[in-house]
Amino acid sequence: MRHRIATLILAATAVTPSSALWAGEGLTLDVAGDVGLELRAFVDSPAPSTVGFERQPETWQGSIHMAPEVVIDHANGRDRFVVEPFARLDSDDSERTHVDLREATWQRVGDDWDLVVGLDVVFWGVTESRHLVNVINQIDAVEDLDEEDFLGQPMIAFGLQRSWGYLRAFVLPGFRERTFPGIEGRLRASPPVDVDAARFTRSRGNDALDAALRYSHVIGDWDLGAHLFVGTSREPRFEQSSDGEHLVPVYERMEQIGLDVQNTTGAWLTKLEAIVRSTDSDDFAAAVAGVEYTLFGLVGAADLGLLAEFLRDGRDPARAPATAFDRDLFAGARLTLNDVADTNVLLGGFVDLDSGSTSLRFEGDRRIGDAWRAEVTAQVFLDVDARDALAAFENDAFAQLSLTWSF
Amino acid sequence: MPLKFIVRAGAGVALLSHGLLTLTLWTLSATAAEGRSMPDATAGADSAAAKGHAIAARSDRSDRGFGDSEVELQMILRNRAGDEATRALRITTLEVPDETVGDKSLVVFDEPRDIAGTAFLSHAKILEADDQWLYLPSLRRVKRISSANKSGPFLGSEFAFEDFTAQELEKFDYRFVRTEPCGDLVCDVIELTPRYEHSGYTRLLAWIDQTDHQYRRIEFFDRGGEALKTLEIDAYRQYEGGIWRGHRQTMTNHKNGKTSIFVYGDYAFGVGLTDDDFVKSVLRRTR
């Protein structure tokens, strides 16, 4: 596997990257992707109260990752085959060392319809601080705390584009369990999650079939979306194992309806995501609403974007999966330099309006040369209340440098 | 805590910068002139205005009826020290016959490689803000973005977003200035005054040749009235149906010494694109 990927990388770099690697018989083959190094430094030692703290890295955690992508187009893209594996090798955490197929699809495009068969990642939603309506894919939670990395979901998805909007129906066979850092990892719960002990409330477990329907449309300044999901919740609740050494993820049946709306007027984006979810143990509603405003040309060509979002989640923490976003405020500022290196700097933070628990995150990235990108990330947790979902991370403030090479 | 998107979106938006991108390039305008009443040509000032408008309208008409097009574009960004960065992208455009609405366009990036697959969909408007969506392949996310800033830089280049839509006839008032030789041709020089208040320019001077009626050179004057940039358009070729395209556009910024050169490949016209190829849901499958 590794050898084949290396061969592909060599082959890809031997030609002009933007042109097809190979073309003939109405087929074109493209290879792209990236390879990266990541180094994390933790400010504090692991908290002695953490179960298994002696096995956690004291300060440093490094990893390498790669995500090559192979695309074969037939008949000018009418049929397309895509394979995009992902692999990470971590210096400490054997759970974070993992491989996944982010995408392995056959896609057929008709005049006003499209069909996707295979593993794919689908994104729904408009808000920045939390993706409430984005329920098709499981979160690859060992990757980052930011819940922006997803596992490929097996699906058959049929989309219909009509004058009244875009309607897409999903049949989702095969459930993907969430990944969690292992006992040797930082940024984890205490005690750690035992992914091998996962339980399901549906009788067919992770073989049960899920289904979803998504409608989206644009009317003037409004981008609208609505969805219905019936199946297994991607978000587990946790039970203590009998020996108290582990947390056991429990995946329940859920039905959910949701709405996402964005209005775009001038430099203002106004956003709302809202859901109503029914599970075996709890029924609740949740919402994220906010604004994004951009000060264009603040200094020279640089733009400053300002974000504020309010998060509310009505779930019962005793019965439903824990969330850090029960009643929180998110605020962020993003500076975009609009330079040749595409330099960006972001500072964002969450404050729990009840407990005052705060998490702040910094991200900065820029291109180096034509093919490299450097990214610095740092996150701290302040005044974290012992009952807050962030409490487990109190000693895990970190800074991270990553270098990624794209081909 | 999904903060990453914000930064990724930033990367895309840095590229595309906020605003729009109608890709109705100077040589690619499509709104036009036919059927519009001319300004009164009575007094001297009015007659200069009428003549200026007629020259711009004549150039605009020479582009009508291209239907749809596909082209690859190489951007060379050069700073004062001579350092160069290049970008490669593909642009597909659908001409919208309704003159009160602008064209639809889709831009997909191939280079630099870290942003390959980033795509940008624009539905241009004549008098209101454009509708624009950005697709970020790493997150597989489509985001509607603000198009409020038309004087901002296009893709980190010396082109502003408004430079791409500026040619829409109704966005300017015109005045004929003089006729003079330009290279081997004879050009009419006209002055363009932006009608919308948030333009980054007080006026433009444009050289339009009398043979093929194409824009050859445009000088931009900033809000302080000083010479800001000069655009030279050459490597013109005429395609089937009489459509002209300038295949090289060189924008020189006199204030910062930077130059942006846009080099176009061969245009393909009449590729059979429809409105369904320019809806939000197609962004997910652009590559």
Image (tube, coloured by chain):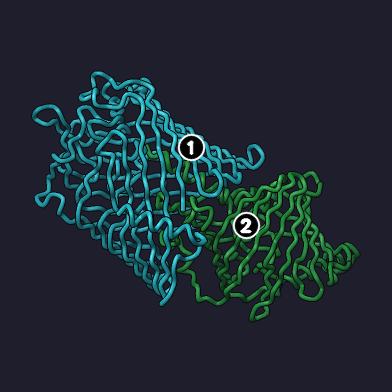
Disc 1 marks which residue? A307
Chain letter for the green part: B
Question: Which chain has been coloured cyan in this picture?
Answer: A
Work out which quarter of the rendered image holds the N terminus of chain A and state it.
Answer: bottom left
| Chain under callout 1 | A
Left or right of residue A73, residue A49 in this image:
left
x, y percentage for residue A120?
A: 31, 56
Q: Quadrant of residue B255?
A: top right
Please, what is the three-letter code of the amino acid marked with disc 1?
A: Leu
Q: Which mark is residue B195?
A: none
Q: CA distance from mark 1 to mark 2?
A: 32 Å
Would you name the residue on which mark 2 appears? B75
Above or below: residue B113 compared with residue A165: above
Read off the chain for label 2.
B
Instruction: Please report the residue visible at 24 percent of the width from the left and 36 percent of the height from the top.
Output: A315
Q: Position of residue B222 (x, y in %)?
A: 76, 47
Mark 1 touches mark 2? (CB < 8 Å):
no
Examine the rendered structure and indicate whether residue B154 appears above or below residue A22. above
Q: Nearer the viewer, residue A93 or A257?
A: A93
> Callout 2: 10 Å neighbours few (<14), some, many (20+)?
many
Q: Secondary structure at mark 1?
A: strand
User: Is residue B189 found left or right of B135 in the rendered image?
Assistant: right
Residue at image position (37%, 67%) is A80
> What is the x, y in percent for residue B217?
78, 62
Asked whether residue A275 is in view, the answer is yes
How many marks on residues? 2
